[in-house]
Amino acid sequence: MRYAQLCIMLAVVLWGPGSAYAASEIEELKIQLQQMMKRIEQLEQAAATKASAESHIKVAANPVEKAKEPETPTRKVVRAAIGENSGNPSLSLVGTFTGQRIRGSGGVRSSSFLPLSEAEIVFGANIDPHARLDVTVTGANGTMAVEEGFITANLPWGLNLRAGRKFLPVGMVNEKHPHALIYADRPNGLVNMFGPEIFVGDGVLIDRPFFVGDSVQTLTAGFFSTQNDVAFDPTGTSQYAGIARWSGLWDLSDAATFDLGANYLQGKNGIATSHSLTRVAGTHFALKYQGLSQAGFSLEGEWLRRWQQMGAGVTTAVNDGSYLLATAALDRNWKLFSRFDYSRLYDQATPIRLTERAISAGLVWNISEFQGITLQYKHTRNALTAVATDLGIAAGGRANAWYLRWVVAIGPHRAHQY
Amino acid sequence: MNKFKYIMLTMLLLLPVVADAEPYIVATLPALGQIAAAVAGEDGKVKVLARVGQDPHFVLPKPTLARHLAKADLLVTAGLALEGGWLPPLIALSRNNRIRPGQAGYVAGADAIEVLGMMDKVDRSMGDVHPEGNPHWWLDPLRAAVVASAIAERLAKIDPDHAAAYHQRATAFGKRLQALVNIWKPRLAGATSVVSYHDSYLYFSQRFGIPVVGFIEPKPGVEASTRHLDTLLTVIAREHVGQIWVEPYHMGRIVKRVASLSGAELVNMPDAVDGEGADGYLAMIESLLKGAGVGR
């Protein structure tokens, strides 16, 4: 339309008043027209920018000079970078490469160098205004499986519902994904308690946080089925259990917190047709401090006791599993840690007490926010059955293990639990 | 009858509390809290989640912080995903639907201003970049004034009885900031180039016309390599860089070494200082201006 107008104007100028203009005058008019065209384009651009800005943002009138600088690219419309929208869930991938070198009693030797030990694909999005879905699909040892997949819904009276497959909130570590832990292995106490894999349940969990003074107190209760073959059914058959937990977090100062909690779970274990309950009780604590430079320290631990009935007239096996972890953050990128693992098995029939101890130390380098490398050494003595199987040594044996773990994350991964 | 009296007495006692219920405003960062307090004045109460001197990218998502969000009427954030690593789980834990993004009780300052430093093609090989734009806008006093007006608009909707007061305070705050800029801009004219640790001062440097020619970080969130520092030293010499600007939480061995080797002056440039309301915010800007003006 603009070009048509300009052509008409040009025609009028050239042929309207007469055709006796000199060539120089025609050239001059052409230049003027070109300048006018440029000016029209500038005005159109300015008008379009203004209309776009007005339609997308509301900036209140202010008596200050315009807060706008043209030196670098600018934009007023902020688009979501999280990757989650009404059509697609957020999607992230966490790759864990863990190499290990184990030298155990009885001449046991094994090693691997940075295989992709676990690939975790996380999908998550709001379903509607009432609920959210998060699914974690994990590929490990050549197979893919849904590691976690649960719906989160806000219920009345401040209750939160999580339904589906979930890492169970037992102690401090079990609910966390392994890549979020500072160390590369799983504490021996938890391996003896629930096996080398995370203790998972399919069911419902309801929790209610209470903000009391400077603290948050959270009560959790749930009912689930589990195929755990160490604490429950050795054949891996589903068994039903219930769980109750209390967890409290207090602000000691702006930079320090103290966490204390306890939990209890109980369910049939399927070892016998009667008198075959498994009960687990435990407590955990954490003291954390982080300064402004992100240097800091933490001391945390948990203790769990498991009573595993073996049937009528058969004694109950009692197993303790615990750890104490100390970490020191030198700055944002470098951390040191040391962990002491303690497990005990008490069989009333024999009666024999077997005690296992392990000590670990490690160094963590967070190369950036999205990848980190952990080097860890662990020495285990008098390994109990589950740990011995995991390390590939005979029960009662000892082992020295080195772990090298490289964790990388791509995509919008949600913040880890505090 | 006695029971009725007690009920009436209780209601009478509660009445002033209900009548004087002031908006509870939570700000993610200290400077945002000061801007919000400058607008709210005595008609609102402000709580800040991050501490003065804390890196705004890496605030620990302590669940205890959610207790403030649970009772908030208004949440003021920087936006542009600056708080993306720690704020969303706290909002979820608070279960306060009034302050969720998109609701009336949520204000992201970046939504009200002209954003700088946006990138069209972004991937993580470029470091921890914010694709929507540089989120450190609160270091520009005039953008802070615009955000103050946006906060006033929102507070006026939440608490219409004090709408005029909110707008009045935002206008007065804006005038003070404009006066500050008018005084300092000519003083800093012709300032020599600077290097900063992180790209935190984009808005500040553009407002006052101070060129930032390099960064200690090779890419946002990535530690400097010796090779990068060697290159940076060459840039500092070539561009006659007079100052190295560093936030207190980035002050360390590497920046001191670069300053020592280059001869450039190492200047502590805080992105938050202690102080209440408008005075606190102005103190931060004056601190930056004095830092930038040292030796000029």
Image: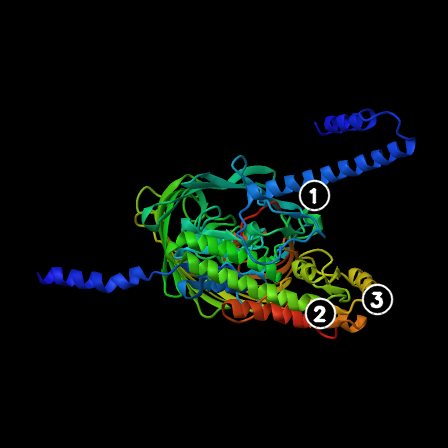
Q: Is residue A399 left or right of residue A347?
A: right
Q: Is residue A336 left or right of residue A220?
A: right
Camera-near label (1 vs 2) is 2
Q: CA distance from mark 3 to mark 1?
A: 31 Å
- Is A94 rendered above or below residue A293? above
Q: Are marks 3 and 2 on the same chain?
A: yes
Q: Residue furthest left?
A: B1
Which chain does the residue under circle 1 lie in? B
Type of amino acid under label 1: Lys
- Is B14 rendered above or below residue A73? below
Label 3 crowding class (10 Å Cα cut-off): few <14, some 14-19, many 20+?
few
Q: Is residue A290 visible?
A: no
Compare marks 3 and 1 and give the one earlier in the sequence.
1
Residue B106, position in %: x, y?
47, 51
The foreground one among A286 and B53 is: B53
State if disc 1 and disc 3 touch (CB < 8 Å): no
Q: Residue furthest bottom?
A: B295
Type of amino acid under label 2: Arg
The foreground one among B213 and A143 is: B213
> What residue is disc 1 on?
B121
| Residue for point 82% across, 62% down | B235
> What residue is disc 2 on?
B187
The dot on residue B237 is 3
Q: Is residue B230 left or right of residue B122?
A: right
